[in-house]
Amino acid sequence: MSESAGKSVPDEGLRQGIGSLELGLQILNAIAEAPQPPSLKNLSDQLQLSPSRLHKYLVSLLRLDFITQVNGSRYTLGTAALTLGIAALRHIDPIQLAFDACERLHAITDRTLSVTIWNGSAPLVIKWLDASRPVAVNVRLGTELSPFFSASGRLFLAHLPVQRREQIIDAFYAAPPALPRYRGQGLERAEFTRHLEQVRSTNLCAFYGDFLPDINVLSSAIFDINGQIQAIITLMGMSGDTEIEPGSRHQRLLSACTRSVTRQICGKTPTELSA
């Protein structure tokens, strides 16, 4: 029997840590998150630490090159912090994070879920998870979706560079096969542009049975540090039991999911990236 067998393992939240290390990292985080290099007084006020105690931590961080001084009185991140950041970015796989999050959301909601990426001209489905009661849609793994007639497509369109987006929209409205719809109404070009602005601002695109009768669809995007979409997670289900209105359970769960993955990728939420 192993030495640890029969012994209770302390809860993660109750394990003893090193308080001075945690405080040092809090100071480092405060410097990293500051919009401008903070002074000793700025940090002292923010962290509620005495200047003398704070200064000792700053000296240690300076010695290890985690921070550097600017203009002799302010602090910013140093080379060692940059090395850590680059190493962290190398180990991040945004698509795998999106897949993992999609599977967790699927277990919670039991709704049909997909992950899409932009293939240069349209959304491409790269993951598909059926609910226990699958919805009847002609979409599966590897399907290329319309930028206009899919919720994920509209999200991608909304975040494309303006010139590229306008080119795609102009080409479509020159001879549309049908008008894009939202809540049962066909959208002319100006209305569609306004719709995309709302989609962009909320990071949500919803279909209330607009193209698939009795099926609700909701998409939300995952972003990288540059504010570019890495992937989109889409949730769908029958309108009778899949509420996607703002503030609904499924909307809150999906939004929390994409916010969490975005934070894992770049340390910020979509709202913070767009600020």
Image (cartoon, helix red, strand yellow):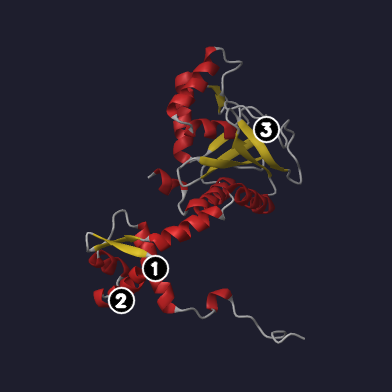
Instruction: Write the residue at 66% across / 83% down.
Output: 8
Disc 1 from disc 2: Cα separation: 14 Å
Q: Residues within 10 Å of mark 2 (few under 14, many from 20)?
A: few
Question: Which of marks 2 and 1 precedes in the sequence?
Answer: 1
- Residue 31: image quadrant is bottom left
Whether label 1 touches label 2, CB < 8 Å: no
Query: Can you see residue 149?
Result: yes
Where is residue 220 drawn, in percent x and y? 55, 41
Disc 1 from disc 3: Cα separation: 50 Å
Q: Nearer the viewer, mark 2 or mark 3?
A: 2
Instruction: Write the residue at 58% across / 27% down.
Output: 121
Quadrant (top left, top right, bottom left, bottom right) of the N terminus: bottom right
Q: Residues within 10 Å of mark 1 (few under 14, many from 20)?
A: few
> Most extreme residue toward the top, as rendered?
175
- Say above or below: 56 vs 191: below
Instruction: Write the residue at 35% across / 71% down.
Output: 63
Residue on which disc 2 sits: 56
Question: Which of marks 3 and 1 precedes in the sequence?
Answer: 1
Q: Nearer the viewer, residue 154 or 66?
A: 66
- Say above or below: 59 vs 113: below
- Say above or below: 237 vs 182: below
Say what amino acid the circle numbered 1 marks. Answer: Gln
